[in-house]
Amino acid sequence: MTLRWGILATGGIARKFTSDLITAGLTVAAAGSRTQESADRFAGEFGILAAHGSYAALAEDPGVDAIYIATPHPQHVEAARLALAGGKHVLIEKPITLTGFEAAEIRDLAEARGLVAMEAMWTRYVPMMARIREILAAGTIGEVRAVSADHTQSISTDPAHRLNALELGGGALLDLGVYPISFVWDVLGAPTTIQASGRIGETGADTEVATVMTHASGAVSTTMSSSRGAGPNTAHIVGSRARIDID
């Protein structure tokens, strides 16, 4: 069976994802936007046959099996509810939701309907991560004692920019910090304790966030994210016999 994709929202990241689906030879069957004009324009750009002028109409399209959700962060949960109610699997842009409660709701809705709900954390699937898992499983670096990772960019100080707008789910943690935190989780598993400190910008959105976590094995981890300064963007896995440095 060929999975038939629907694209919910038609912004920049949706364009990149749709282009990649087509490049991979996968089927993009429909697009949905808040207006028919926007949906038609997007569908025309990519040669998509069905264009829907509402997210609800896309969710009800019988010609779609899975929906990629590319709205701004605060709209993820409602879009996922629509898609799951329509019997569609969902791939939701990161961060999957704004809160853990919303994420649990999406998980439970999908489970109740026998559907897949997944966060689009692409970094988990790159060849580098597959190789790192092999090295760790083989015990090559010994016992993992500590992990550190950062994602820091100089993006924008414009109060209207999405990253600085609280109403759009702005903040360095949700856009940038998700990457090092996801990396730490993938290497060490869920944290058992979390401490975090940050700086709040002019609009109330966080501009820097640092975390210190401990994990079930006893290993410790640190992460740093910033939207106001570009750092090295590296990660390090420190073992008892060797280490892995990631640029």
Image (cartoon, rainbow, N blue to C red):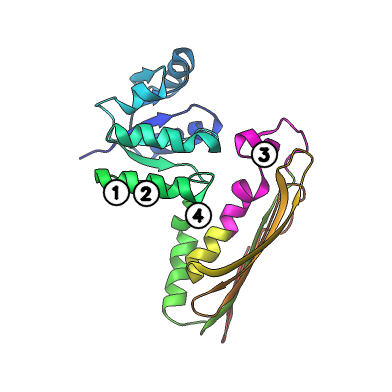
Q: Residues within 10 Å of mark 4 (few under 14, many from 20)?
A: few
Quadrant for the N terminus, please.
Answer: top left
- Other-residue count near label 1 (Cα within 10 Å), few / some / many at <14 / 14–19 / ≥20: few
Q: Residues within 10 Å of mark 3 (few under 14, many from 20)?
A: many
**Mark 2 lies on residue:** 107
Single out the mark in the foreground, 2 or 4.
2
Residue 162 is a magenta residue: yes
Residue sitting at 63 percent across and 51 percent down?
173
Give whichever of discs 3 and 2 has the lower sequence position.
2
- What's the amino acid at mark 3? Leu
**How far apart are the alpha carbons under marks 2 and 1?**
6 Å
Percent across and percent down for residue 158 are 77, 33
CA distance for labels 1 and 4: 24 Å
In this view, 36 is above or below 103: above
Task: Say what amino acid the circle numbered 4 marks.
Answer: Thr
Between circles 4 and 3, the one closer to the viewer is 3
Which residue, given by chain and number where applicable, does mark 3 sit on? 163
Decide which of tag 1 and tag 3 comes sooner along the chain.
1
Residue 144 versus residue 194: which sits nearer the camera? Answer: 194
Whether residue 144 appears in this view of the structure is: yes
Residue highlighted by disc 1: 111
| Residue at screen point 52% across, 68% down | 191
Sooner in the amino-acid sequence: mark 1 or mark 4: 1
- Label 2 neighbour load within 10 Å: few <14, some 14-19, many 20+: some
